[in-house]
């Protein structure tokens, strides 16, 4: 398995542990990642206000660089926001040759050209359909027996493009969680919005949405995420949210490859669990029980 | 409510311009049947002054003044539930984004906090190619000139600093990493 890897800006900063744990888990599963050389920002949701062309151009630049590398057929993206931008660009470029021509006129300034032949895929898609629960099961060293995990998908890996899961009631993480011996927390919040960048501009609304997710996860040992924005909204404001809702909503939040990596016998150091903002005692002691 | 950005309430000063800019958004939602599935699906509807369904009607009837005094579109968090469920298959999340774009381009004061946030993001990318999170948040705080906004983030910033997740870079000088691509895009867009 070979992938052209697009980490995106967050994975170099506040979500560095998502990058490192993805690389470690994917290596353990026998996949090779080739980082796209000289990649730049995908545009993120910020580009919504910059007009229709610029977000396409920014994503297209990275996809053109990936095409030049010739080392795989799929672009692998762990960040849901980057994934959606690249995917949207892929779909639009395939449907609309006129805009593709315009985008290529701009890319020419950097001696780049986009054909649009590569497929853009989210990390969860690759973990579910290329690696799959059977392979995961065969690689387990420490079964996470007795752990209850709440799978949190967020929005942009599911919608609007329903590629690998049900966009209304997602289930793709469940076989992976069960494969490592853990139980799935029963809830309906997996595909609901965390508030996204409202946390920066309309904090009370952001806290209401993230708070509802944390509240519904009560009883689980951890929430697992597949997006740096969901992760920081759920882990970064727990004390403030708990205070505003007058209930204890502190809880362990992990990235999915960290959870799977732990079951593979990778160390907390390999998976950089020390960099997460919220890893709580009950989770750590259960993990140690699983290991002994 | 402060609507002054450049010294005047622009939504009232330039109704024709806003009407003109609304046309592509009208094309996007032209087939709306006012069923309200979007409103029922929206996680942020509770924080909006008009529901999404009502917003599309306002767009179709060209009520620019009401639209650009409303906080509805700025409350969209791009979760795509409405787009997914719309029985007419309309690109509703994109239509919300198009309204955000008009508000940003016209510099409407009511949306200053959100547009400043994204504007600083865009400038940061143009300069550095990849986002520098610390530099971006600092420039956002500086623009907002609010004594309280930064304090909402001090607890988080302290945690991030301890984990060495925020780096302080030397500012990049010169034209900027993505300057050529940005300029060429602006040139093509202005030709339309």
Image (cartoon, coloured by chain):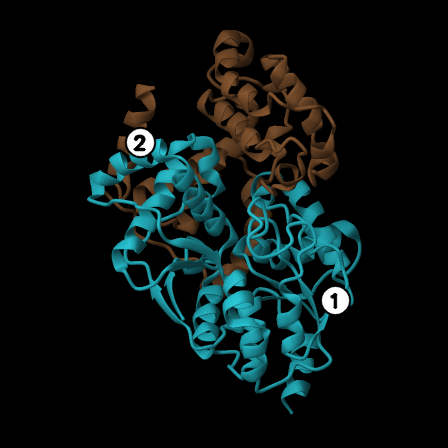
Residue A57, image x and y in percent?
35, 39
Q: Residue B185, labelled with which disc?
A: 2
Judge the density around disc 1: few (<14), some (14-19), many (≥20) Cα neighbours within 10 Å: many
Q: Residue B182 lies in what quarter of the image? A: top left
Q: Which element type, helix, strand or loop, lies under badge 1?
A: loop
Task: Check the picture and name the quadrant holding the N terminus of chain A.
Answer: bottom left
In the figure, the shade used to draw chain A is: cyan
Q: Nearer the viewer, residue A33 or B13?
A: A33
Q: Is residue B47 among the parts visible in the rendering?
A: no
Work out whether residue A26 or residue B123 is closer to the camera in this orientation and state it.
Answer: A26
From the viewer's perspective, is residue A14 above or below residue A107? below
Residue placed under numbered mark 1 in the picture: A185
Chain letter of mark 1 equals A
Residues at marks 2 and 1 touching, judged by CB atoms closer than 8 Å: no
Q: Position of residue B20 (x, y in %)?
A: 48, 12
Picture colour for chain B: brown
Q: Is residue A109 left or right of residue B148?
A: left
Q: How many marks?
A: 2
Q: Position of residue A186 (x, y in %)?
A: 77, 64
């Amino acid at each position: 398995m070979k992938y052209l890897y697009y980490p995106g800006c967050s994975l170099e900063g506040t979500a560095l542990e998502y990058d490192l744990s993805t690389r470690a888990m994917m290596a353990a599963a026998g996949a090779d990642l080739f980082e796209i050389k000289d990649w730049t920002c995908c545009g993120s949701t910020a580009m919504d206000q910059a007009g229709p062309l610029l977000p396409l151009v920014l994503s297209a630049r990275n996809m053109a660089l990936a095409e030049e590398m010739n080392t795989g057929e799929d672009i692998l993206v762990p960040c849901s926001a980057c994934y959606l931008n690249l995917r949207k660009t892929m779909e639009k470029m395939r449907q609309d040759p006129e805009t593709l021509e315009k985008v290529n006129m701009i890319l020419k300034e950097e001696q780049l050209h986009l054909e649009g032949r590569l497929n853009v895929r989210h990390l969860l898609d690759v973990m579910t359909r290329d690696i799959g629960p059977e392979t995961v099961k065969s690689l387990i060293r420490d079964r996470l027996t007795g752990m209850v995990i709440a799978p949190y998908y967020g929005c942009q890996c599911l919608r609007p493009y329903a590629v690998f899961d049900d966009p209304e009631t997602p289930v793709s993480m469940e076989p992976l969680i069960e494969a490592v011996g853990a139980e799935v927390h029963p809830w309906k919040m997996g595909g609901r919005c965390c508030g996204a960048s409202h946390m920066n501009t309309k904090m009370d609304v952001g806290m209401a949405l993230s708070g509802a997710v944390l509240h519904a996860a009560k009883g689980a040992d951890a929430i697992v995420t597949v997006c740096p924005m969901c992760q920081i909204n759920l882990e970064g404001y727990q004390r403030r949210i708990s205070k505003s809702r007058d209930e204890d909503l502190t809880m362990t939040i992990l990235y999915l490859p960290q959870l799977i990596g732990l079951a593979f016998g990778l160390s907390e150091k390999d998976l950089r669990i020390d960099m997460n903002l919220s890893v709580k005692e009950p989770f750590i002691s259960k993990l140690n029980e699983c290991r002994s | 409510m402060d609507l002054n950005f450049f010294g005047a309430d622009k939504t009232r000063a330039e109704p024709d311009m806003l009407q003109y800019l609304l046309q592509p958004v009208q094309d996007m939602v032209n087939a709306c049947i006012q069923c309200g599935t979007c409103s029922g699906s929206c996680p942020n509807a509770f924080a909006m002054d008009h529901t999404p369904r009502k917003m599309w009607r306002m767009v179709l009837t060209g009520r620019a003044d009401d639209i650009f005094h409303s906080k509805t579109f700025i409350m969209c968090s791009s979760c795509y539930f409405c787009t997914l469920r719309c029985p007419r298959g309309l690109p509703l999340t994109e239509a919300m984004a198009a309204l955000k774009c008009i508000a940003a381009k016209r510099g409407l004061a009511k949306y200053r906090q959100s547009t400043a946030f994204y504007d600083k993001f865009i400038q940061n990318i143009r300069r550095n190619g990849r986002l520098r999170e610390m530099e971006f948040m600092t420039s956002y705080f500086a623009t907002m000139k609010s004594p309280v906004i930064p304090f909402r983030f001090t607890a988080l910033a302290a945690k991030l600093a301890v984990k060495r997740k925020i780096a302080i870079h030397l500012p990049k000088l010169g034209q900027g990493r993505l300057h050529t691509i940005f300029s060429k895009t602006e040139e093509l867009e202005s030709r339309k």
